[in-house]
Amino acid sequence: MTKQTHAFQAEVKQILHLVTHSLYSNKEIFLRELVSNASDACDKLRFEALDNAALYEDQPNLEVRVFFDTAAKTLTIRDNGIGMSADEAAAHLGTIAKSGTREFMAKLEGEQKKDANLIGQFGVGFYSGFIVADRITVESRRAGLPAEQGMRWSSEGTGEYELEAITRAERGTDVILHLRDEDAEEFLKTWRVKSTIAKYSDHISLPILMNKETWDADKGEQVATDEWETVNKAAALWTRSKSDITDAEYQDFYQQISYDQAAPLAYTHNRVEGRSEYTQLLYVPAKAPMDMWNRDKRGGVKLYVKRVFIMDDAEALMPVYLRFVKGVIDSADLPLNVSRELLQESRDVKAIREGSTKRVLGMLESLADSDSADEKARYLAFWKEFGAVLKEGLGEDFQNRERLAKLLRFASTHGEGAEQSVSLADYVARMKDGQDVIYVITADTLAAAKSSPQLEIFKKKGIEVLLLTDRVDEWMLSHLHEFEGHALQSVAKGAVDLGKLQDEAEKKQAEEAAETFKPTLDKLKESLKSRAKDVRVTTRLVDSPACLVVEEGDMSGHLARLLKQAGQDAPASQPILEVNAEHALVKRLGADGAPFDDLAHILFDQALLAEGGQLEDPAAYVARVNKLLTA
């Protein structure tokens, strides 16, 4: 066949420029695509040779070679796979997004299709070569054809390609990129090509070979030799059987993908089969990264398709609240967009995300529920680092809300330490007879929570209260309303109703105090009308003169402060002042000659300070206190 010039298919002329200049955000992607195509060609030969071993000719070892010619400014990707005939080159290289491999797969039926699961389906990637090349030459001979039936395909990626017959002794394909001068010469450097292969193609099952370099003292630089060396690992740890992998190998692999020198806290390795087939190797780190609270930070899961690296930080495969998880997910096939740089939402993607989420939660549950003291300690170590992040899932993952609730840990008035180690199940198991509510309090710090006046009646009666001091806790409570049928109740909201835990004598005493104190309450309401929604006699205070609470449904003072610190405006609302009618300072309000207004504002300001709030006018508070001290 003499050299012939052909026009690309009409859609190629219209789309080729877009593919090579806009479709790929990173120009080094071309090497991934071409190495993947070379690997596919070798896999296809291996499959066809099952029925015809003669296709191997005299080269049974399949491989990919990558080399360059600095003088000619060419980069070549060579494989000894199935190769192409002239007709196949015209059909597949002249048509955009037409994959020979996809067509090959369509011909397989039944069990054969299952056996061919290693064969890729990447068609459009060949054109990515034009990102760095102003001309691409393809020389190939299909396995089984005589040497005289080789072919050469060449194009500048504009509107035409040339096709001619050549004599080629070796089967397989050479893709020769004639690199542009201005921006592609970096790919004429061994380190640049090696690092790109290591990033994207390290785990392809075939060896990828490059010329070995040695130091030339006379030239003062590295020079290529005729010796070839393998530049990829050619083995993916996650594809091996779990029984063949040691704990040390799992930890080494974690350090490779995470750049974390500490051993992981836990890991899980599974192969999922069914409608969506994928392998997952997921790790929980021992320490939180510095940017953990940046929710725009992408996750730590790497996506592979048939061992070919597709993208870092595949956030579509893991929910945001599990952004600390590191690892690898390798899918048999996923709906990527045409450039393979973005995942398209589909049932497969959703199934992988749900499966991976459940696997991580299961891994955490096995630690949290273990009878082993060591594993329980590991879970508390996890909670200390990542617990606040996990709480985000209560509002984001309704499907797993109950599982997440069981994983929560809190500080509590039950213990003296600051460690968050009490689960909701622990709390429920210790609830007093007649108690049907889980009591909680939110505060800026553990010290503020423990010393809050609102806890006094609960301490007196020995009722446990959970102490919530993470910034995310107020938001969490808006999504977590109950646990195992027990409502969560903030001790700083609404009137205290201890139900069966409060005897009739106490209730009667509180009602009588409110009636006796009514004239003073009315004066307090008038004096504080600009600051308090209401003033009432408390049932929750024992030693303190007053405290601030909010009505059910209103925003707590703690949440309002958090919003203010974040630069947001909180809805305008006033708290309720509760006063202890038995306290000496409150009793003095009704004494003759007492500065009523000053005492009323001091009570309010002290209650505000006790709950962690800030005074709007500290100087006025100091002046009132000084006035009382010198009276």
Image (cartoon, helix red, strand yellow):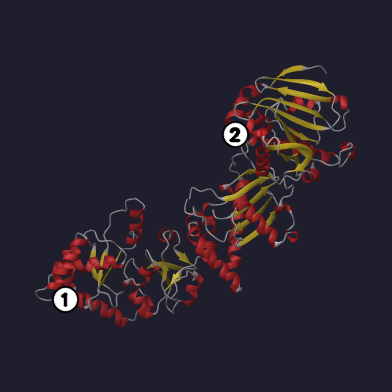
Mark 2 lies on a secondary structure that is loop
Q: Is residue 121 something one can see in this rendering?
A: no
Quarter location, residue 174: top right
Q: Residue furthest front?
A: 218
Rendered location of residue 105, percent (x, y): 76, 38
Asked whether 168 or 51 is in front, the reply is 168
Q: Is residue 100 left or right of residue 362?
A: right
Q: Amino acid at mark 1?
A: Arg
Quarter occupied by the C terminus: bottom left
Rendered location of residue 280, percent (x, y): 66, 53
Q: Amino acid at mark 2?
A: Tyr
Q: Is residue 161 something one can see in this rendering?
A: yes
Q: Residue furthest left?
A: 593
Using the numbered discs, state the Cα–Cα distance from disc 1 to disc 2 in whole angstroms.
77 Å
Q: Which residue is mark 2?
A: 24
Q: Badges 1 and 2: C-beta atoms under 8 Å apart?
A: no
Q: Is residue 33 left or right of residue 539?
A: right
Q: Dot 2 surroundings within 10 Å: few (below 14), some, or many (20 or more)?
A: some
Is 275 rendered above or below residue 182?
A: below
Quarter occupied by the N terminus: top right
* Residue 588: numbered disc: 1
Is 481 rendered above or below residue 396?
A: below
- The residue located at (57%, 35%) in the rendering is 25
Q: Is residue 337 left or right of residue 401?
A: right
Is 315 rendered above or below residue 496?
A: above
Q: Dot 1 surroundings within 10 Å: few (below 14), some, or many (20 or more)?
A: some
Quarter location, residue 418: bottom left
Mark 1 lies on a secondary structure that is helix
Is 255 rendered above or below residue 224?
A: below
Looking at the image, is mark 1 or mark 2 earlier in the sequence? 2
